[in-house]
Amino acid sequence: MNKQEERPSLNFLEAIIEEDINNGKNGGVVHTRFPPEPNGYLHIGHAKSICLNFGLAEKYGGKTNLRFDDTNPVTESTEYINAIKDDVRWLGFDWEDREFYASDYFDQLYEWAVKLIKEGKAYVDDSPVEDIRRMRGTPTQPGEESPYRNRSVEENLKLFEGMKNGDFDEGSRVLRAKIDMTSTNMQLRDPVMYRILQKEHHRTGDKWKIYPNYDWAHGQSDALESITHSMCTLEFEIHRPLYNWFLDQIGDFDPRPRQIEFARLNLSYTVMSKRKLLELVNGEYVNGWDDPRMPTILGLRRRGYTPESIRNFAERVGVAKRDNVIDLSLLEFCIREDLNKRAPRVMGVLAPVKLIITNYPEGQTEELEVENNPEDPESGNRIVPFSRELYIERDDFMEEPPKKFFRLGPGREVRLKGAYIVQCEDFKKNEETGEIEEIYCTYDPQTKSGEDTSGKKVKGTMHWVSAEHAQKVEVRIYDRLFSDPDPAGHKEKDFKEFLNPDSLQIIKDAYVEPSLKEAKHLEHFQFMRKGYYSLDPDSTAEHLIFNQTVTLRDTWAKINKK
């Protein structure tokens, strides 16, 4: 193969799909599905699965279904369904008219369950849940047959119909598949197919008093939708023989879905369990599912992450056969890389101290032209007002600066971004706190940016805002939600013990240049030398709130250089 014919190496899922296509399996069709359970908001791990299922189908000219695994009315709601659809669309994917629900197939699943009962392959078990769990045995010890395992077909049919009609209490009976209580795979030890739940369903109302378990609903839903490749995370690998056993019992399918497992996404310094995330929300450890510290797609979106950055992250993570933990720094690298190209540079001062240019005319304002983004030649310039009194960052001034401190100090010169070179002449301290209150400088009119005729050279450039024209804003600085890279990995401790008490810092008196008064919700900016920020959806014209998306620090790049 010559260089022009070289192709990037395939991941193992692509290799399986291409082999199927080359062998003419399924008529060369690729049909995938994304099957979320609508019992919570999606997180970054789901985003990887979305990108994988939709991306593979798109690559091979196929289709992807969006199917909600709505088999548990206790925990599911239309709120979650609508949020999931919004997330998938926001990521840039379209399921067109292929929106399905496991509940679409409840009648067919019931008929197939009756078929298994008639064939002696399923039975109603009256055993308490604790006994069923005990009788399953252990991975090293065979299970024990239920005393109800050999009921007659007639009795099982009658009892199962009674379960459907609501004649029995919740938890009093289940329908189990009759497979093999001595199997080395515990999933085949007479798994539960149906349980009694006398709860109203968000789509079927009170029609059903029994609901199918995941293993009974999932593979059959795949088959009914002509799914060819059913991608699941690794915890379902042990379920695959059961997936196939159920399909074998109910008929021949063409195409027949094939379950393939891949490693789920584990991200450092967070948790990826919906149960744990719900615990954080209900316990008010965070401010809802869209809290920018949460790993939910909704939280990442509010924080300022872009769909492109998340798709790029999913691509960089790749597809693995074994679980591993991805460093959070890679996700931060992806959003930083994306925003570096598109986010306009603006000036914002988060810890302000006043700088007064004593030889600048009082009452005078200049309109200075500053570039929007040096990485984007098409971004143009903007006008920034300049005046006698400015705000600069407090840590850009030191009373006794060290040798390599290239900012402002007594007698030192720096350039103000897009403006002039100034020299510090004096400063004033608060007598009680010792804190610097004002800094006094002079400027050289010949050093105006773009017109400098002075020949002066300075090593430091500082951002600033005009005190007269600045817009006061609230800025929210985010750190990692947990202080431990694996908060859920300590069996002897509650994961919430590792919550980072400094994960949110709110700055009430930050100042930004006046152009940001026109910012739109979720619009992105780089605050020069501070990081990337976006306007929070709760902002109003009177109260602007900016969320820090990510700092300018590039930890991932440093890791890769080692």
Image (cartoon, rainbow, N blue to C red):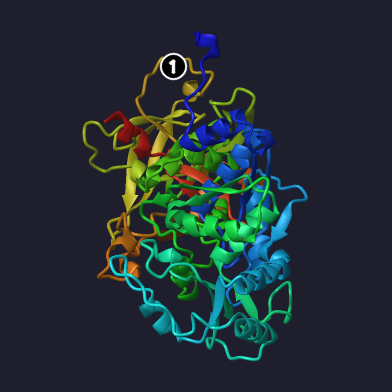
Q: Nearer the viewer, residue 290 or 414?
A: 290
Residue most extreme to the top:
2
The kind of residue on which mark 1 rests is Ser
Instruction: Name the residue located 68 percent from the left edge and 50 percent from the top edge.
Output: 65
Residue highlighted by disc 1: 454
Q: Is residue 530 above or below residue 116?
A: above
Instruction: Please tell me how many numbered marks the rendered image carries.
Output: 1
Q: Nearer the viewer, residue 503 or 507?
A: 503
**Residue 70: image location, x then y, percent:** 63, 67
Instruction: Name the residue located 34 percent from the left edge and 45 percent from the top edge.
Output: 395
Q: Is residue 71 above or below residue 458?
A: below
Instruction: Name the residue located 71 percent from the left edge and 66 percent from the top edge.
Output: 108
Q: Nearer the viewer, residue 496 or 475?
A: 496
Q: Is residue 555 above or below residue 486?
A: above
Give the image quarter of residue 486: bottom left
Label 1 neighbour load within 10 Å: few <14, some 14-19, many 20+: few
**Is any part of residue 36 visible from this angle?**
no
**Residue 484: image location, x then y, percent:** 30, 58
Q: Is residue 441 above or below residue 381?
A: below
**Residue 281: image location, x then y, percent:** 49, 70
Residue most extreme to the right:
97
Instruction: Name the residue located 46 percent from the left edge and 40 percent from the top edge.
Output: 319
**Residue 531: image location, x then y, percent:** 45, 42
Looking at the rendered structure, the secondary structure element under dot 1 is loop
**Is any part of residue 330 visible from this angle?**
yes
Task: State the quadrant of the C terminus.
Answer: top left
